[in-house]
Image (cartoon, rainbow, N blue to C red):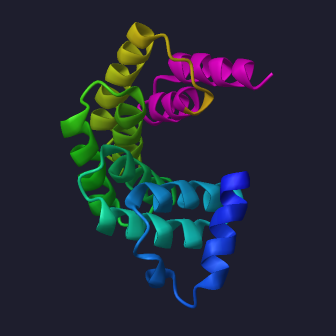
Amino acid sequence: MAGFKRAEEIAAKSTKLTELSQLDGNFYARYALCALFSGNVEMALKLYEQAYKLAPDSANVCNAYGYTLADENMQLPFAKELIENALRQEPDNVAYLDSFAWVLYRMQKQPEALQAMLRTIIESGLSGLTDKEIWEHAAKIFAANELEILAEFYQWKAESLAE
């Protein structure tokens, strides 16, 4: 949280967010994540927008911005485009694959979301990644595709990680 405090100090010295343009896209992306953790989604989206303006080719920025838009059920076609940009750069990145499955789910494209989630699960197994949020997404996507047993299993997996 020290980074968040420092970012707040810099922002407080500025009368406008755009005056911080000398800072790079990664700064804005990190600051946006801090804003999300503090529950300020509106500020996070503004910061991700600035990060994207400064670093439109950053896979991390594209995924974070796209995922946040998808999670908030906002600008879904643009969110999908951002996440696809990230995936073009890192096609096996489990976080990006999960984001893609999630945006498809939010767009009500359930068969496509299911296919994307299956790939996410395969890649997470290959990489050894275990993530509560991915399993929660899997549970919702399986449920939306009427695969209740799998939905219950992945919900159980998510809950077991929370303990």
Callout count: 0
Q: Is residue 39 visible?
A: no
**The one of 108 and 136 positioned closer to us in this rendering:** 136
Residue at 39% of width from left, 8% of height from top?
A: 126
**The one of 35 and 10 positioned closer to us in this rendering:** 10
Q: Position of residue 61 (x, y in %)?
A: 38, 52
Q: Which residue is outermost to the left?
A: 88
Residue 152 located left or right of residue 107: right
Residue at 40% of width from left, 41% of height from top?
A: 99
**The one of 49 and 123 positioned closer to us in this rendering:** 49
Identify the image quadrant of residue 152: top right
Residue 70 located left or right of residue 53: right
**The one of 137 and 8 positioned closer to us in this rendering:** 8
Q: Is residue 123 visible?
A: yes
Which SS type dominates the magenta stretch? helix
Vertical arrangement, residue 2 with respect to residue 160, above or below? below
* Residue interval drawn in magenta: 134-163
Vertical arrangement, residue 20 with respect to residue 96, above or below? below
Residue at 26% of width from left, 32% of height from top?
A: 90
Q: Position of residue 136 (x, y in %)?
A: 58, 32
Q: Position of residue 1 (x, y in %)?
A: 73, 51
Tell me, yes or no, whether the highlighted magenta stretch contains residue 160: yes
Identify the image quadrant of residue 117: top left
Residue at 64% of width from left, 83% of height from top?
A: 13
Q: Which residue is outermost to the bottom?
A: 15
**The C terminus: image quadrant:** top right
